[in-house]
Image (cartoon, rainbow, N blue to C red):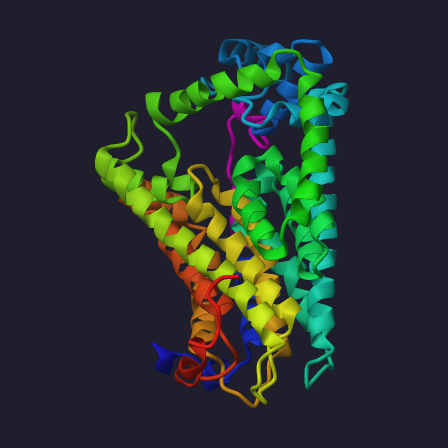
């Protein structure tokens, strides 16, 4: 295969390969869009884009009209959405959009519920584009700052401009926008948390990370690793945010109790009582469920549960090791007698942050593919780290494999749902597992040297604090 590629491409820098890959993806997506526009459509397809927003619109309307106790009542939700679909010509079929979030998040959509459905949908799209743009700008600053230390600083715009280009061309971003999901706001929150975290600002990081619990599957792992990394002061920020969100939930009578009791039943109905979109998830539960049982209705078998649990435990142990080792390396760094330059503390934290974000889907039972837009954060931190490295030293093996597997994962997401549906093999999960494993190894790296040279020094470092 390598013999079929031009030598100029084989020896091209990762940046050049990414730009060429981005151009190819843009052509591919453009071809699909043009083909879709030229395809005749049935009249009933009006309103199919952004159907996930109907759950948000429903929640905002319920709160505005004083029916917050019905947020998790599937019968009330189905009735309202059927009437809304009939009024605006939205094709729901037999589907229903349950409210999956904690009660406080419904306040976000009360202002939008004053608008007509399609006007609210357009406003929501604008909000998401703005959040994605702000997040991309903040991530660009990380790469631009790293580019200043590059031995060849000319044309640094070619480095940071890749971030918004690859975000817009990514399948998670396209799915998030076409489904009218809230993933772009999640990206902004994770980005802001990262900026506080990497600079050691524990309270600020905790304040923002607490907001991520509007989707608990996004905030749980990140919050735990954040506390492990920066200590108890993170709890101050998370406690303040949590108290505000609790008050906001208590202001909606009956909603918090219904969330605690009705949500598990709703999740059971959607994932067990009827066929489910397991091919759209990037979790071990989805991987083993689809591989062994398919996507039909029914409880997961014992084999599925055991394999999913063992897989998640393995990643959790690796992430815990990376967190403890990062703390140990940061504390032992000042006492090191080696003449070799130590890895900067910010870089240490960057590697742990990247590992935590990439590992989160593999530790959660519920994580849709469009939420992988958050991988833009660890990808940016990796790019910035590689820009700062000493180019006189060879690239470590873990970094070389990351530069191969991560782009493969990026591209595979374009076809993963269709292939997984037909083959029952959700290949996005093994690819993400490889990325997470390499990031775990990278976070625990002692210095930028050959691993054999590190072995003699490992025994002198504490494992925990």
Foreground: 295 or 288? 288
Foreground: 296 or 289? 289
Rendered position, 164 above or below 452: above
Q: Is residue 70 visible?
A: yes
Rendered position, 448 above or below 95: below
Q: Does the magenta stretch include residue 181?
A: no
Residue 368 lies, in percent from the top left, at 48, 40
The region drawn magenta spans 30-50
Q: Quadrant of the N terminus?
A: bottom left
The quadrant in which residue 318 appears is bottom left
Q: Is residue 29 visible?
A: no
Rendered position, 413 above or below 449: above
Rendered position, 2 above or below 392: above
Residue 185 is left or right of residue 313, and the answer is right
Foreground: 415 or 198? 198
Count of numbered circles in the view:
0
Residue 21 lies, in percent from the top left, at 53, 66
Identify the residue shown where x is 56% and y is 90%: 392
Residue 373 lies, in percent from the top left, at 57, 49
Foreground: 64 or 181? 64
Q: Does the magenta stretch include residue 31?
A: yes
Identify the residue shown where x is 68% and y is 81%: 150
Residue 282 lies, in percent from the top left, at 42, 45
Residue 253 is left or right of residue 332, and the answer is right
């Amino acid at each position: 295969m390598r013999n079929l590629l031009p030598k100029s491409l084989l020896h091209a820098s990762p940046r050049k390969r990414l730009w060429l890959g981005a151009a190819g993806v843009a052509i591919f997506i453009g071809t699909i869009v043009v083909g879709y526009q030229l395809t005749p459509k049935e009249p009933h397809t009006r309103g199919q884009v952004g159907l996930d927003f109907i759950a948000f619109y429903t929640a905002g309307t319920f709160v505005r009209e004083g029916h917050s106790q019905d947020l998790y009542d599937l019968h009330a939700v189905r009735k309202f959405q059927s009437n809304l679909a009939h009024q605006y010509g939205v094709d729901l079929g037999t589907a229903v959009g349950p409210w999956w979030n904690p009660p406080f998040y419904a306040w976000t959509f009360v202002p939008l519920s004053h608008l007509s459905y399609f006007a609210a949908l357009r406003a929501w799209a604008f909000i998401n584009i703005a959040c994605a743009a702000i997040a991309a700008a903040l991530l660009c600053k990380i790469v631009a700052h790293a580019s200043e230390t590059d031995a060849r600083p000319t044309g640094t715009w070619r480095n940071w401009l890749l971030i918004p280009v690859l975000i817009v061309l990514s399948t998670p971003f396209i799915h998030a926008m076409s489904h009218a999901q809230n993933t772009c706001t999640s990206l902004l929150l994770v980005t802001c948390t990262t900026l506080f975290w990497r600079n050691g600002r524990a309270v600020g990081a905790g304040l923002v990370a607490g907001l991520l619990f509007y989707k608990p599957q996004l905030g749980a792992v990140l919050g735990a690793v954040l506390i492990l990394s920066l200590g108890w002061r993170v709890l101050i920020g998370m406690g303040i945010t949590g108290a505000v969100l609790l008050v906001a939930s208590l202001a909606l009578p009956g909603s918090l109790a219904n969330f605690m009791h009705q949500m598990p039943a709703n999740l059971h109905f959607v994932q067990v009582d009827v066929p489910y979109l397991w091919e759209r998830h990037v979790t071990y539960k989805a991987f083993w469920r689809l591989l062994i049982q398919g996507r039909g209705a029914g409880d997961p078998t014992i084999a599925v549960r055991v394999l999913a649990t063992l897989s998640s435990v393995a990643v959790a142990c690796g992430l815990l090791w990376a967190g403890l080792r990062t703390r140990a390396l940061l504390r032992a760094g000042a006492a090191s007698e080696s003449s070799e330059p130590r890895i900067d503390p910010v870089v240490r934290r960057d590697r742990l942050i990247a590992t935590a974000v990439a590992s989160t889907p593999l530790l959660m039972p519920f994580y849709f593919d469009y939420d992988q837009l958050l991988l833009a954060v660890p990808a940016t931190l990796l790019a910035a780290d590689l820009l700062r490295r000493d180019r006189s030293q060879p690239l470590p093996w873990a970094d070389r494999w990351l530069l191969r597997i991560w782009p493969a994962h990026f591209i595979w997401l374009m076809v993963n749902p269709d292939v997984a549906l037909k083959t029952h093999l959700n290949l996005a999960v093994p690819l993400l597992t490889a990325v997470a494993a390499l990031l775990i190894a990278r976070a625990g790296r002692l210095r930028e040297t050959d691993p054999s040279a590190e072995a003699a020094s490992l025994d002198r470092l504490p494992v925990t604090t």
